[in-house]
Image (tube, coloured by chain):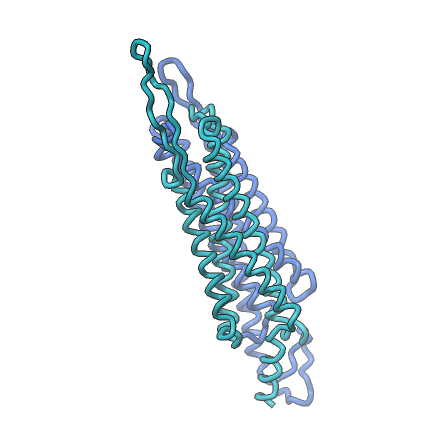
Protein backbone atom coordinates (compact mmCIF):
# COMPACT_ATOMS: atom_id res chain seq x y z
CA UNK A 1 0.00 0.00 0.00
CA UNK A 2 2.75 2.44 0.95
CA UNK A 3 4.91 1.61 -2.08
CA UNK A 4 1.90 1.94 -4.42
CA UNK A 5 1.11 5.37 -2.98
CA UNK A 6 4.75 6.35 -3.26
CA UNK A 7 4.93 5.30 -6.91
CA UNK A 8 1.69 7.12 -7.70
CA UNK A 9 3.01 10.29 -6.06
CA UNK A 10 6.26 9.90 -8.01
CA UNK A 11 4.40 9.59 -11.29
CA UNK A 12 2.13 12.53 -10.52
CA UNK A 13 5.02 14.72 -9.45
CA UNK A 14 6.49 14.39 -12.93
CA UNK A 15 4.74 17.01 -15.01
CA UNK A 16 2.89 16.24 -18.21
CA UNK A 17 4.83 17.13 -21.42
CA UNK A 18 3.12 20.48 -22.24
CA UNK A 19 3.69 21.78 -18.73
CA UNK A 20 7.31 20.69 -18.62
CA UNK A 21 7.84 22.23 -22.07
CA UNK A 22 6.39 25.51 -20.77
CA UNK A 23 8.71 25.46 -17.76
CA UNK A 24 11.65 24.62 -20.00
CA UNK A 25 10.92 27.51 -22.36
CA UNK A 26 10.45 29.91 -19.42
CA UNK A 27 13.78 28.87 -17.97
CA UNK A 28 15.54 29.21 -21.33
CA UNK A 29 14.06 32.67 -21.84
CA UNK A 30 15.15 33.64 -18.31
CA UNK A 31 18.70 32.48 -19.08
CA UNK A 32 18.77 34.63 -22.20
CA UNK A 33 17.31 37.68 -20.47
CA UNK A 34 19.64 37.59 -17.45
CA UNK A 35 22.67 36.81 -19.63
CA UNK A 36 21.84 39.80 -21.85
CA UNK A 37 21.50 42.04 -18.82
CA UNK A 38 24.84 40.86 -17.43
CA UNK A 39 26.77 41.30 -20.65
CA UNK A 40 25.29 44.68 -21.58
CA UNK A 41 25.93 46.14 -18.14
CA UNK A 42 29.39 44.60 -17.84
CA UNK A 43 30.48 46.18 -21.11
CA UNK A 44 28.94 49.52 -20.15
CA UNK A 45 31.65 52.15 -20.25
CA UNK A 46 31.87 55.57 -21.79
CA UNK A 47 34.59 58.21 -21.88
CA UNK A 48 34.12 61.79 -22.94
CA UNK A 49 36.53 64.67 -23.24
CA UNK A 50 35.38 67.99 -21.88
CA UNK A 51 37.06 71.37 -21.96
CA UNK A 52 37.85 72.26 -18.37
CA UNK A 53 39.91 75.39 -18.89
CA UNK A 54 41.13 77.64 -21.66
CA UNK A 55 44.76 78.79 -21.54
CA UNK A 56 45.25 81.60 -23.99
CA UNK A 57 43.57 80.26 -27.09
CA UNK A 58 44.14 76.50 -26.59
CA UNK A 59 41.52 74.61 -24.58
CA UNK A 60 42.59 72.04 -22.00
CA UNK A 61 40.65 68.83 -22.37
CA UNK A 62 40.11 66.30 -19.64
CA UNK A 63 38.75 62.79 -20.04
CA UNK A 64 35.89 61.72 -17.82
CA UNK A 65 34.88 58.08 -17.67
CA UNK A 66 31.64 56.50 -16.58
CA UNK A 67 31.84 52.76 -15.91
CA UNK A 68 29.61 50.32 -14.12
CA UNK A 69 32.32 49.53 -11.55
CA UNK A 70 31.99 52.99 -10.06
CA UNK A 71 28.57 52.27 -8.63
CA UNK A 72 28.21 49.38 -6.15
CA UNK A 73 24.56 48.93 -7.13
CA UNK A 74 25.57 48.22 -10.73
CA UNK A 75 28.30 45.83 -9.59
CA UNK A 76 25.71 43.94 -7.54
CA UNK A 77 23.41 44.02 -10.58
CA UNK A 78 26.03 42.38 -12.80
CA UNK A 79 26.91 39.76 -10.18
CA UNK A 80 23.28 38.90 -9.40
CA UNK A 81 22.32 38.51 -13.06
CA UNK A 82 25.46 36.47 -13.74
CA UNK A 83 24.66 34.09 -10.88
CA UNK A 84 21.05 33.79 -12.05
CA UNK A 85 21.94 33.01 -15.66
CA UNK A 86 24.64 30.48 -14.68
CA UNK A 87 22.29 28.76 -12.20
CA UNK A 88 19.47 28.48 -14.73
CA UNK A 89 21.88 27.22 -17.39
CA UNK A 90 23.13 24.59 -14.95
CA UNK A 91 19.60 23.48 -14.12
CA UNK A 92 18.79 23.25 -17.83
CA UNK A 93 21.83 21.08 -18.48
CA UNK A 94 21.24 18.82 -15.46
CA UNK A 95 17.50 18.35 -16.03
CA UNK A 96 17.61 14.53 -16.34
CA UNK A 97 19.22 14.22 -12.90
CA UNK A 98 16.78 16.55 -11.16
CA UNK A 99 13.51 14.67 -11.54
CA UNK A 100 13.57 12.84 -8.20
CA UNK A 101 11.32 14.30 -5.52
CA UNK A 102 13.85 15.76 -3.02
CA UNK A 103 15.98 17.28 -5.80
CA UNK A 104 12.88 18.74 -7.42
CA UNK A 105 12.04 20.60 -4.22
CA UNK A 106 15.64 21.77 -3.77
CA UNK A 107 15.62 23.21 -7.29
CA UNK A 108 12.32 24.96 -6.53
CA UNK A 109 13.73 26.49 -3.34
CA UNK A 110 16.85 27.69 -5.12
CA UNK A 111 14.62 29.12 -7.87
CA UNK A 112 12.93 31.33 -5.30
CA UNK A 113 16.26 32.50 -3.89
CA UNK A 114 17.62 33.29 -7.35
CA UNK A 115 14.47 35.23 -8.22
CA UNK A 116 14.89 37.31 -5.05
CA UNK A 117 18.51 37.97 -6.06
CA UNK A 118 17.56 39.19 -9.53
CA UNK A 119 14.71 41.31 -8.19
CA UNK A 120 16.90 43.08 -5.64
CA UNK A 121 19.65 43.66 -8.23
CA UNK A 122 17.18 45.18 -10.65
CA UNK A 123 15.59 47.34 -7.94
CA UNK A 124 18.93 48.73 -6.71
CA UNK A 125 20.16 49.42 -10.25
CA UNK A 126 16.86 51.07 -11.14
CA UNK A 127 17.08 53.48 -8.20
CA UNK A 128 20.66 54.40 -9.18
CA UNK A 129 19.59 54.83 -12.82
CA UNK A 130 16.77 57.16 -11.75
CA UNK A 131 19.27 59.17 -9.72
CA UNK A 132 21.65 59.39 -12.65
CA UNK A 133 18.89 60.53 -14.96
CA UNK A 134 17.10 63.05 -12.75
CA UNK A 135 19.71 63.92 -10.16
CA UNK A 136 18.68 65.19 -6.75
CA UNK A 137 18.70 68.96 -6.43
CA UNK A 138 18.25 68.84 -2.67
CA UNK A 139 21.49 66.95 -2.24
CA UNK A 140 23.20 68.99 -4.98
CA UNK A 141 23.69 65.86 -7.10
CA UNK A 142 23.64 66.68 -10.78
CA UNK A 143 22.26 64.21 -13.32
CA UNK A 144 24.89 62.59 -15.52
CA UNK A 145 22.74 61.30 -18.38
CA UNK A 146 22.99 64.52 -20.32
CA UNK A 147 26.77 64.07 -20.54
CA UNK A 148 26.99 60.29 -20.78
CA UNK A 149 24.13 59.43 -23.12
CA UNK A 150 25.41 56.09 -24.40
CA UNK A 151 26.19 54.92 -20.86
CA UNK A 152 22.65 55.70 -19.75
CA UNK A 153 21.03 54.09 -22.78
CA UNK A 154 23.01 50.87 -22.39
CA UNK A 155 22.28 50.82 -18.68
CA UNK A 156 18.60 51.24 -19.42
CA UNK A 157 18.63 48.33 -21.87
CA UNK A 158 20.38 46.09 -19.35
CA UNK A 159 17.82 47.09 -16.75
CA UNK A 160 14.92 46.26 -19.06
CA UNK A 161 16.42 42.86 -19.84
CA UNK A 162 16.82 42.19 -16.13
CA UNK A 163 13.21 43.17 -15.39
CA UNK A 164 12.06 40.81 -18.15
CA UNK A 165 14.21 38.06 -16.64
CA UNK A 166 12.76 38.71 -13.18
CA UNK A 167 9.21 38.51 -14.56
CA UNK A 168 10.01 35.23 -16.32
CA UNK A 169 11.51 33.81 -13.13
CA UNK A 170 8.40 34.87 -11.20
CA UNK A 171 6.11 33.13 -13.68
CA UNK A 172 8.32 30.05 -13.58
CA UNK A 173 8.23 29.99 -9.78
CA UNK A 174 4.47 30.39 -9.59
CA UNK A 175 3.89 27.74 -12.22
CA UNK A 176 6.35 25.34 -10.64
CA UNK A 177 4.73 25.77 -7.21
CA UNK A 178 1.31 24.80 -8.48
CA UNK A 179 2.46 21.87 -10.60
CA UNK A 180 5.03 20.50 -8.17
CA UNK A 181 2.41 20.06 -5.46
CA UNK A 182 -0.41 19.09 -7.82
CA UNK A 183 -0.43 15.57 -6.47
CA UNK A 184 -1.08 16.87 -2.98
CA UNK A 185 -3.61 19.51 -4.12
CA UNK A 186 -5.68 16.84 -5.84
CA UNK A 187 -5.95 14.94 -2.56
CA UNK A 188 -7.67 17.86 -0.81
CA UNK B 1 -10.07 5.42 22.04
CA UNK B 2 -10.92 5.88 18.32
CA UNK B 3 -10.45 2.93 15.95
CA UNK B 4 -9.41 3.23 12.28
CA UNK B 5 -12.83 2.09 11.02
CA UNK B 6 -14.81 4.72 12.91
CA UNK B 7 -13.52 8.27 12.50
CA UNK B 8 -13.46 10.21 15.70
CA UNK B 9 -16.08 12.95 15.75
CA UNK B 10 -14.20 16.19 16.19
CA UNK B 11 -14.33 19.80 15.14
CA UNK B 12 -11.59 19.41 12.48
CA UNK B 13 -13.12 17.33 9.64
CA UNK B 14 -10.00 15.69 8.18
CA UNK B 15 -9.00 13.82 11.33
CA UNK B 16 -9.68 10.19 10.60
CA UNK B 17 -6.71 8.19 11.81
CA UNK B 18 -5.32 7.14 15.17
CA UNK B 19 -2.49 9.65 14.74
CA UNK B 20 -5.04 12.49 14.85
CA UNK B 21 -3.64 13.79 18.14
CA UNK B 22 -0.17 14.41 16.75
CA UNK B 23 -1.70 15.95 13.62
CA UNK B 24 -3.73 18.40 15.70
CA UNK B 25 -0.62 19.29 17.66
CA UNK B 26 1.34 19.82 14.43
CA UNK B 27 -1.45 21.92 12.93
CA UNK B 28 -1.72 24.03 16.08
CA UNK B 29 2.07 24.50 16.24
CA UNK B 30 2.22 25.55 12.61
CA UNK B 31 -0.68 27.96 13.09
CA UNK B 32 1.07 29.51 16.10
CA UNK B 33 4.32 29.71 14.15
CA UNK B 34 2.59 31.41 11.25
CA UNK B 35 0.86 33.88 13.58
CA UNK B 36 4.12 34.78 15.33
CA UNK B 37 5.96 35.24 12.05
CA UNK B 38 3.24 37.48 10.66
CA UNK B 39 3.18 39.60 13.82
CA UNK B 40 6.94 39.99 13.59
CA UNK B 41 6.71 40.98 9.92
CA UNK B 42 3.90 43.47 10.65
CA UNK B 43 5.86 45.04 13.50
CA UNK B 44 9.05 45.25 11.45
CA UNK B 45 7.42 46.81 8.38
CA UNK B 46 5.43 49.26 10.53
CA UNK B 47 8.63 50.27 12.31
CA UNK B 48 10.47 50.72 9.01
CA UNK B 49 7.71 52.86 7.50
CA UNK B 50 7.34 55.05 10.59
CA UNK B 51 11.08 55.55 11.15
CA UNK B 52 11.62 56.50 7.51
CA UNK B 53 8.59 58.79 7.47
CA UNK B 54 9.81 60.69 10.53
CA UNK B 55 13.28 61.23 9.14
CA UNK B 56 13.99 64.84 8.37
CA UNK B 57 16.96 66.98 9.17
CA UNK B 58 18.21 70.31 8.03
CA UNK B 59 21.45 72.19 8.32
CA UNK B 60 22.67 75.62 7.30
CA UNK B 61 25.93 76.04 5.44
CA UNK B 62 27.09 79.55 4.54
CA UNK B 63 23.52 80.81 4.78
CA UNK B 64 22.22 78.06 2.47
CA UNK B 65 19.76 75.69 4.07
CA UNK B 66 20.27 72.07 3.16
CA UNK B 67 17.31 70.01 4.30
CA UNK B 68 16.84 66.31 3.84
CA UNK B 69 13.43 64.67 3.78
CA UNK B 70 12.43 61.27 2.52
CA UNK B 71 9.97 62.86 0.04
CA UNK B 72 12.89 64.29 -1.94
CA UNK B 73 13.99 60.86 -3.10
CA UNK B 74 11.60 58.62 -5.08
CA UNK B 75 13.31 55.45 -3.85
CA UNK B 76 12.70 56.38 -0.20
CA UNK B 77 9.10 57.34 -0.97
CA UNK B 78 8.61 53.93 -2.57
CA UNK B 79 10.19 52.39 0.55
CA UNK B 80 7.69 54.06 2.89
CA UNK B 81 4.70 53.16 0.72
CA UNK B 82 5.82 49.55 0.24
CA UNK B 83 6.37 48.98 3.94
CA UNK B 84 3.03 50.58 4.81
CA UNK B 85 1.29 48.31 2.28
CA UNK B 86 3.16 45.29 3.66
CA UNK B 87 2.15 46.10 7.23
CA UNK B 88 -1.51 46.65 6.33
CA UNK B 89 -1.64 43.47 4.25
CA UNK B 90 -0.04 41.37 7.00
CA UNK B 91 -2.52 42.58 9.62
CA UNK B 92 -5.39 41.93 7.19
CA UNK B 93 -4.24 38.39 6.46
CA UNK B 94 -4.21 37.49 10.16
CA UNK B 95 -8.00 37.27 9.95
CA UNK B 96 -8.08 34.77 7.08
CA UNK B 97 -9.02 31.26 8.28
CA UNK B 98 -6.57 28.59 7.16
CA UNK B 99 -7.33 25.61 4.89
CA UNK B 100 -9.90 27.45 2.79
CA UNK B 101 -9.69 28.51 -0.85
CA UNK B 102 -8.99 32.08 0.31
CA UNK B 103 -5.81 30.89 2.00
CA UNK B 104 -4.54 29.62 -1.35
CA UNK B 105 -5.01 33.13 -2.75
CA UNK B 106 -3.14 34.44 0.29
CA UNK B 107 -0.09 32.43 -0.79
CA UNK B 108 0.04 34.29 -4.10
CA UNK B 109 -0.31 37.67 -2.42
CA UNK B 110 2.29 36.69 0.18
CA UNK B 111 4.87 36.15 -2.52
CA UNK B 112 3.93 39.42 -4.22
CA UNK B 113 4.23 41.44 -1.02
CA UNK B 114 7.52 39.74 -0.15
CA UNK B 115 8.95 40.76 -3.51
CA UNK B 116 7.62 44.31 -3.08
CA UNK B 117 9.38 44.59 0.28
CA UNK B 118 12.68 43.20 -1.05
CA UNK B 119 12.65 45.57 -4.01
CA UNK B 120 11.88 48.56 -1.77
CA UNK B 121 14.66 47.61 0.66
CA UNK B 122 17.14 47.15 -2.19
CA UNK B 123 16.29 50.50 -3.78
CA UNK B 124 16.49 52.37 -0.46
CA UNK B 125 19.74 50.57 0.32
CA UNK B 126 21.29 51.76 -2.95
CA UNK B 127 20.25 55.37 -2.22
CA UNK B 128 21.57 55.14 1.33
CA UNK B 129 24.93 53.91 0.04
CA UNK B 130 25.21 56.89 -2.29
CA UNK B 131 24.19 59.27 0.48
CA UNK B 132 26.81 57.87 2.79
CA UNK B 133 29.77 57.42 0.47
CA UNK B 134 28.89 59.73 -2.39
CA UNK B 135 30.09 59.01 -5.89
CA UNK B 136 33.30 60.83 -6.73
CA UNK B 137 33.10 59.87 -10.40
CA UNK B 138 29.74 61.58 -10.84
CA UNK B 139 30.67 64.52 -8.64
CA UNK B 140 28.10 63.59 -5.99
CA UNK B 141 29.19 64.57 -2.49
CA UNK B 142 28.08 62.45 0.49
CA UNK B 143 25.45 64.14 2.61
CA UNK B 144 25.62 62.14 5.83
CA UNK B 145 28.18 64.49 7.26
CA UNK B 146 25.77 67.41 6.98
CA UNK B 147 22.53 65.67 8.00
CA UNK B 148 23.51 62.90 10.45
CA UNK B 149 20.07 62.50 12.02
CA UNK B 150 18.50 61.82 8.62
CA UNK B 151 21.12 59.17 7.86
CA UNK B 152 20.61 57.51 11.24
CA UNK B 153 16.87 57.31 10.67
CA UNK B 154 17.36 55.83 7.20
CA UNK B 155 19.76 53.24 8.61
CA UNK B 156 17.30 52.26 11.35
CA UNK B 157 14.47 51.99 8.85
CA UNK B 158 16.59 49.79 6.59
CA UNK B 159 17.44 47.44 9.46
CA UNK B 160 13.76 47.07 10.38
CA UNK B 161 12.90 46.46 6.74
CA UNK B 162 15.56 43.74 6.47
CA UNK B 163 14.03 41.99 9.47
CA UNK B 164 10.64 42.27 7.79
CA UNK B 165 11.99 40.84 4.53
CA UNK B 166 13.57 37.86 6.27
CA UNK B 167 10.36 37.26 8.22
CA UNK B 168 8.36 37.36 4.98
CA UNK B 169 10.72 34.94 3.29
CA UNK B 170 10.22 32.46 6.15
CA UNK B 171 6.45 33.08 6.02
CA UNK B 172 6.35 32.28 2.30
CA UNK B 173 8.33 29.09 2.78
CA UNK B 174 6.21 28.08 5.75
CA UNK B 175 2.93 28.74 3.93
CA UNK B 176 3.96 26.87 0.80
CA UNK B 177 5.20 23.81 2.58
CA UNK B 178 2.42 23.50 5.14
CA UNK B 179 -0.62 24.63 3.20
CA UNK B 180 0.20 23.04 -0.13
CA UNK B 181 1.69 19.83 1.18
CA UNK B 182 0.30 18.86 4.57
CA UNK B 183 1.95 15.45 4.25
CA UNK B 184 5.37 16.98 3.64
CA UNK B 185 7.79 15.49 6.19
Q: Which residue occupies 52% across, 30% down?
A: B71
Front residue of this view, candidates A25 and A102 = A25
Q: Which residue occupies 64% across, 89% down?
A: B3
Q: Is residue A91 visible?
A: yes
Q: Position of residue B19 (x, y in %)?
A: 57, 82
The total of numbered circles placed on residues is 0
Q: Which residue occupies 57% across, 88% down?
A: A3
Which shade is chain A? cyan
Q: Position of residue B114 (x, y in %)?
A: 54, 52
Q: Is residue B56 visible?
A: no
Front residue of this view, candidates A170 and A156 = A156
Classify residue A137 as left or right of residue A171.
left
* Res A55 → quadrant: top left
Q: Residue furthest top?
A: A56
Which shade is chain B? blue
Say if A28 sits above or below A118 in the image: below
Q: Position of residue A179 (x, y in %)?
A: 62, 68
Say if A177 sits above or below B155 in the image: below
Q: Residue furthest left?
A: A55
Q: Position of residue B125 (x, y in %)?
A: 43, 41
Please state, as top left, top right, bottom left or bottom right, where the N terminus of chain B lies in the image. bottom right
* Res A8 → quadrant: bottom right
Say if B39 sits above or below B154 in the image: below
Q: Residue furthest front?
A: A58
Front residue of this view, candidates B38 and A181 = A181
Q: Which residue occupies 52% across, 42% down?
A: A157
Amino acid sequence: MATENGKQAEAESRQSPPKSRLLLSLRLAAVLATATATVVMALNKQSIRITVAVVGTSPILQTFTAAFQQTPAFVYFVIANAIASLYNLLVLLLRPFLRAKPRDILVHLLDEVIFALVATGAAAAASMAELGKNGNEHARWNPICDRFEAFCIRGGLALMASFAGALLLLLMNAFSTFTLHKSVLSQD
Amino acid sequence: MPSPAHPEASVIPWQTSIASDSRTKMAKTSRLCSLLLRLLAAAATLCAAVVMATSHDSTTIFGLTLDAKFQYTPALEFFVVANAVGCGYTLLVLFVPPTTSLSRLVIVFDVTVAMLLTAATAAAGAMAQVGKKGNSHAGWMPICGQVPSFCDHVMGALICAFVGVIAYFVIVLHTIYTLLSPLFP
